[in-house]
Amino acid sequence: MSSAVPRYSAESEANLVQRLYARDESAMTIFYSNYRAALYRVILRIVKSPDMADDVLQESMLKIWLSFAHYDAGRSRLFTWALNICQHQAIDTLRLKANRQWTKMDDIIGCIPAKQMATPAASMLSSDLATCLAYLKPIYREVLEYRFYQQMSVEETAKHLDMPLGTLKSRNREAMRCLLLIWKKS
């Protein structure tokens, strides 16, 4: 039975660490060949995409190389330190991807001004929006109805619904995510 964590003697790891501190590029090659598979598996479990996992692994290796001076062998093993960097990089990549989707969604959905509702294309978009909103849970639909149809800001909507701003922002974000999924399916 093979372990997911590469096992090396304390001497060989200490030697590798010293070479990495000395900025020895061949030590980074050894590090990469020894730890790549285990780190890749952890990243893949987080990002769920082999292509994205490859990219995250490469970005992580660069980050490890550039920030190696901050590694403290007394606090953690080399693999554990590298694993934390890879996990954080994977999570940051997912957040960035989600943020990009939200930006695209904001461009797609936007807020439909009342003046534009009079045009045939806008009224068609409005009816599509109303149809999609009908699929949302009432707590999410209510938030978006105030945001879209009443053209209220997040702060105004929170005040009108007597809801904490953080709660409203969370519901707004989840509602927009659900709305995008509904729109993609229709």
Image (cartoon, rainbow, N blue to C red):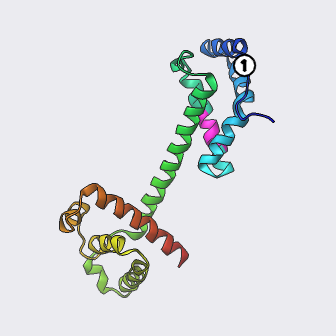
Q: Nearer the viewer, residue 18 or 6?
A: 6
Q: Whole-percent x and y of residue 137?
A: 39, 74
Q: Nearer the viewer, residue 152 or 25?
A: 152
- Residue 56 among those drawn in magenta: yes
The answer to which image quadrant residue 165 occupies is bottom left
Q: Is residue 108 above or below residue 15?
A: below
The answer to which image quadrant residue 86 occupies is top right
- Residue 138 among those drawn in magenta: no
What residue type is disc 1 on?
A: Ser
Residue at point 55% right, 24% down?
66
Q: Nearer the viewer, residue 175 or 100?
A: 175
Residue at point 30% right, 74% down?
142
Residue 1 as seen in the image, left or right of residue 143:
right
Q: Residue furthest bottom?
A: 120
Q: Secondary structure at mark 1?
A: helix
Prevailing secondary structure of the magenta residues: helix
Q: Whole-percent x and y of residue 90?
A: 56, 43
Q: Residues within 10 Å of mark 1 (few under 14, many from 20)?
A: few
Q: Does residue 107 appear in this view?
A: no
Q: Is residue 9 above or below residue 165?
A: above
Q: Whole-percent x and y of residue 70?
A: 51, 20
Residue 34 as seen in the image, left or right of residue 22:
right
Q: Is residue 90 above or below residue 67?
A: below
Residue at point 48% right, 59% down?
101
Pointer 1 residue? 26
The answer to which image quadrant residue 177 occupies is bottom left
Q: Whole-percent x and y of residue 21?
A: 60, 14
What span is colored magenta in the figure? Answer: 54-60
Residue 125 as seen in the image, left or right of residue 24:
left
Q: Does residue 65 appear in this view?
A: yes
